[in-house]
Image (cartoon, rainbow, N blue to C red):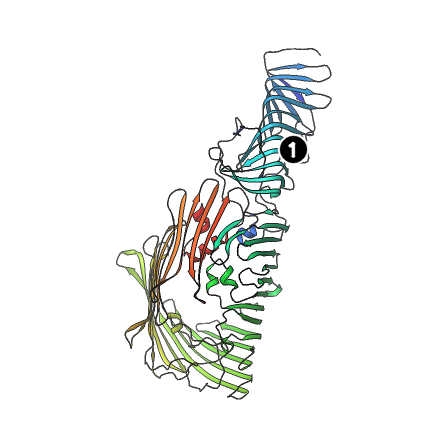
């Protein structure tokens, strides 16, 4: 071999068919010690220092957005590089070339092939093996991966291997260190004795260590062996085998556990495992260990196609350690969007016992659930027609309800409605509502009800006024069984007439053209003759709470078992103030009352007789004129007794998505009087606090209170929530403490605490508060 030392940098060109090997290391999981004391840093000449990672990606778009990704759409994440056709270009300060093609290169050696670069101080080239070998410090870089190592080899057509490495993926961001790193021609990356984190170098609060990690950048997944997650240097979870995604695409694997404590069930820990079964359906296994009850096996299955979507939830606990019974809950939800405007829906639940939600529900629904609905519905809608065929049953949860007071099953319930209008100077509207339903229950009267209600009306008006006279007919027929004091076949037929009219007046306010003010008086006259209806059963009819909308309905009841006689006029006024330029409503005020010319005689069983010539006065005020403030007040005033019947006051301050404070007061005469304070507020750049306090002013007791703290750093979040509440159904008290740790950059699902807090605190946004 001859030697030729030349002072200027020499460029030697190697023609080789290179293979793909530089893979994406997105979302790597790792374990086991790398070289002791060897900490990774961004390779020289790399991108700027890594930014903080985004909050943890959820396993898939379905968990995050309540929908599955479109099948066949690949996630927008880097993949393994395709084999480049570019020739290999090598430059160095000095080179020694042999007659066989071997070479020894030294002094600022740089190897370039397409978008890959490799630099070292001491490189040899084996012409027979067509491979470069590096000794000493080396640096490798491609669009995804940056590596520093102590030695290695590079085969332009076969891959590369580096020893004592530290690596970085600035786009993720992610970094780590490994004793060995191999890049394969098939797009696979193998790391041995490796650790990994998405935290910045200045605060590596968590990391994953593994004895071996294999990444498939084309299939976009990875596996780890003997893996352990460390937080603040302390191992918190050990897994002999770990499977994970590269990027945000869905991948089977363990999710982060949820830890909590309840005075009912004791300590509890949930360890979910996610199964990515197909692009359009998945399964999550959620085994939960309760210290005093045993192991609850939870399963959640979801699916989505272009025409169908749904989910199935099953929880089962064998031999509850406290109640000594088997506990379970099943829920099925499905929707099919069928051709030609048809839709099919199923929503069904079943629970093992009345106390299930008291013992296991994490949200507010557990304290008030009285019934579980089971329904299947086929429906159709277009511009004129609405059709619905439904079967509906209820499971009664509240055991205090007598059998005679429990809801009826409707097997079946068929509803048909139509609506049309004619064009012209005066619009004529005509339509009908009809239904046939079979009411079924184990005790009391049951049977079929047929209802038909045609109507016709006119609509005359302009932007400044409207006049809408209408007439209609309501016919109801009953075919009954077990009717103790009534005939088996009954019917009722009643006409009605109504005149609905109003004005829409608008002008500038006193501050000129900046704001506009409306005045919208409204009058409804309603006439319905009296028919004695005491023999008719009550299947599903009720008297709703009185509000402004209820004043202007043509029926006082919800449901056709009772049709109130009416000879009255409802009068109301609405006024709004809005910003002229943006259209934003600044204030809305309504007030209204019904004046009765004849006292109504039709009543529901137990409903008090109406003796007053006027209904209660109802009023509502909404103010959003001040930036970030919202005020809502409602009042139902008994003008005969000069006292309030119902009222509420709600005040909210919400300057942005991570700040919300609410104050509320609720009053219903002889039923409740409550005050509530809730809020979510940052205590600094890292700390968030939230809580709620509900106090019963009537009984002078606390109904529900919870408080929580959250700390969020650049790459992790810790949340602690404590709650004590009283069941509105049983009066029993329960206390719970819940702990949630999220490591950004590792896939996880949202905690049940997120849903609970969003429901409990008006204006709270888990995403906004955690960012």
Residue at 48%, 42% in the rendered image: 716
Horizontal and vertical percent for residue 345? 58, 65
User: What residue is rendered at 57% in x and 35% in y?
Assistant: 195
Q: What element carries label 1?
A: loop
Q: Kindly indicate the quadrant of the structure image that contains residue 597.
A: bottom left
Residue at (58%, 53%) from the top-left corner? 287
**Residue 671, percent across and down?**
37, 70
Residue 362 % position (x, y): 49, 57
Q: In which quarter of the view is residue 642 placed?
A: bottom left
Direction from residue 97 to residue 579 in the image, left or right: left
Would you name the residue on which mark 1 appears?
Answer: 21
Task: Categorize mark 1 by other alpha carbons within 10 Å: few (<14), some (14-19), many (20+).
Answer: many
- Is residue 80 placed above or below 767 in the rendered structure? above
Asked if residue 278 can be seen in this view, the reply is no
Image quadrant where one finds the C terminus: top left
Question: Residue 546, can we see it?
Answer: yes
Q: Nearer the viewer, residue 328 or 518?
A: 328
Q: In this view, does 188 lie above or below 113?
A: below
Question: How many labels, in total?
Answer: 1
Q: Is 501 left, or right, of 340 in this rendering? A: left
Quadrant housing residue 685: top left
The N terminus appears in which quarter of the rendering?
A: top right
As drawn, which residue projects farthest toward the left? 510
Q: Where is residue 579 in the image (x, y as percent from the top left)?
A: 34, 56
Task: Check the image and report above or below for 363 versus 644.
Answer: above
């Amino acid at each position: 071999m001859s030697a030729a030392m030349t002072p200027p940098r020499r460029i030697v060109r190697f023609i080789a068919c290179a293979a793909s090997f530089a893979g994406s290391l997105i979302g790597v999981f790792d374990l086991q010690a790398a070289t002791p004391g060897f900490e990774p840093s961004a390779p020289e000449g790399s991108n700027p220092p890594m930014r903080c990672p985004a909050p943890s990606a959820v396993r898939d778009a379905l968990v995050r957005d309540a929908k599955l990704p479109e099948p066949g759409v690949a996630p927008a994440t880097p993949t393994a590089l395709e084999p480049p056709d570019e020739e290999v270009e090598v430059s160095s300060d000095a080179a020694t070339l042999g007659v066989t093609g071997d070479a020894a290169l030294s002094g600022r050696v740089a190897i370039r092939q397409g978008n890959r670069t490799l630099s070292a101080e001491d490189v040899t080239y084996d012409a027979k093996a067509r491979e470069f070998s590096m000794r000493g410090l080396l640096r490798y870089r491609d669009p995804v991966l940056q590596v520093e190592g102590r030695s290695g080899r590079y085969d332009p057509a076969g891959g590369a291997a580096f020893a004592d490495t530290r690596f970085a993926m600035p786009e993720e961001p992610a970094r780590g260190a490994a004793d060995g790193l191999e890049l394969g021609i098939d797009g696979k990356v193998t790391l041995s004795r490796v650790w990994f984190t998405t935290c910045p170098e200045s605060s590596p609060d968590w990391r994953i260590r593994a004895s071996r990690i294999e990444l498939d950048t084309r299939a976009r997944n990875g596996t780890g062996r003997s893996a352990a997650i460390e937080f603040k240097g302390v191992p918190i979870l050990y897994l002999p085998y770990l499977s994970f995604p590269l990027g945000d695409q869905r991948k089977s694997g363990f999710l982060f556990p949820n830890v909590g404590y309840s005075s009912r069930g004791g300590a509890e820990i949930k360890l979910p495992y996610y199964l990515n079964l197909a692009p359009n359906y998945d399964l999550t296994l959620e085994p939960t260990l309760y210290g005093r009850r045993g192991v609850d096996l939870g399963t959640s299955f979801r699916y989505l196609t272009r025409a169908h979507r749904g989910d199935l939830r099953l929880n089962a606990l064998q031999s509850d350690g406290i109640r000594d019974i088997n506990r379970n809950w099943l829920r099925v939800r499905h929707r099919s969007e069928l051709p030609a405007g048809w839709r099919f829906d199923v929503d069904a639940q079943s629970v093992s016992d009345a106390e299930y939600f008291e013992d296991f529900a994490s949200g507010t629904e557990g304290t008030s659930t009285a019934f579980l609905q089971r329904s299947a519905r086929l429906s159709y809608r277009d511009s004129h027609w609405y059709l619905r065929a439904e079967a509906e049953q209820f499971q009664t949860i509240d055991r205090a309800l007598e059998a005679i007071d429990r809801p009826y099953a409707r097997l079946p319930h068929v509803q048909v409605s139509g609506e049309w209008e004619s064009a012209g100077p005066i619009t004529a509207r005509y339509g009908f509502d009809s239904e046939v339903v079979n009411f079924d229950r184990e005790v009391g009267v049951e049977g079929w009800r047929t209802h038909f209600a045609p109507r016709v009306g006119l609509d005359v008006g302009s932007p400044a006024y409207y006049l809408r006279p209408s007439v209609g007919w309501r016919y109801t027929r009953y075919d009954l069984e077990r009717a103790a004091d009534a005939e088996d076949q009954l019917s009722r037929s009643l006409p009605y007439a109504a005149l609905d009219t109003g004005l829409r007046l608008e002008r500038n306010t006193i501050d000129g053209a900046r704001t506009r003010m409306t005045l919208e008086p409204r009058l409804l006259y309603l006439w319905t003759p009296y028919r004695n209806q005491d023999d008719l059963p009550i299947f599903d009819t009720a008297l709703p709470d009185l509000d402004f909308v209820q004043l202007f309905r043509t029926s006082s009841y919800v449901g056709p078992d009772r049709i109130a006689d009416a000879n009255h006029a409802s009068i109301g006024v609405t006024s709004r103030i809005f910003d002229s330029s943006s259209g934003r409503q600044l204030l809305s005020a309504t007030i209204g009352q019904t004046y009765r010319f004849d006292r109504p005689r039709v009543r529901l069983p137990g409903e008090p007789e109406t003796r007053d010539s006027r209904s209660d006065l109802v009023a509502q005020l909404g103010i959003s004129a001040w930036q970030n403030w919202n005020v809502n007040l409602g009042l139902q005033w008994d003008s005969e007794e000069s006292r309030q019947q119902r009222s509420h006051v709600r005040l909210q301050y919400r300057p942005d998505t991570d700040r919300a404070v609410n104050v509320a007061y609720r009053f219903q005469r002889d039923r409740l009087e409550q005050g509530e304070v809730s809020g979510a507020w940052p205590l600094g750049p890292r700390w968030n606090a939230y809580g709620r306090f509900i106090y019963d002013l009537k009984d002078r007791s606390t109904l529900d209170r919870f408080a929580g703290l959250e700390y969020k750093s650049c790459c992790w979040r810790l949340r602690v929530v404590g709650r004590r509440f009283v069941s509105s159904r049983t009066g029993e008290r329960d206390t719970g403490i819940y702990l949630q740790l999220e490591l950004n950059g590792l896939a996880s699902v949202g905690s049940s605490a997120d849903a609970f807090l969003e429901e409990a605190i008006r204006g709270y946004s888990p995403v906004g508060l955690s960012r």
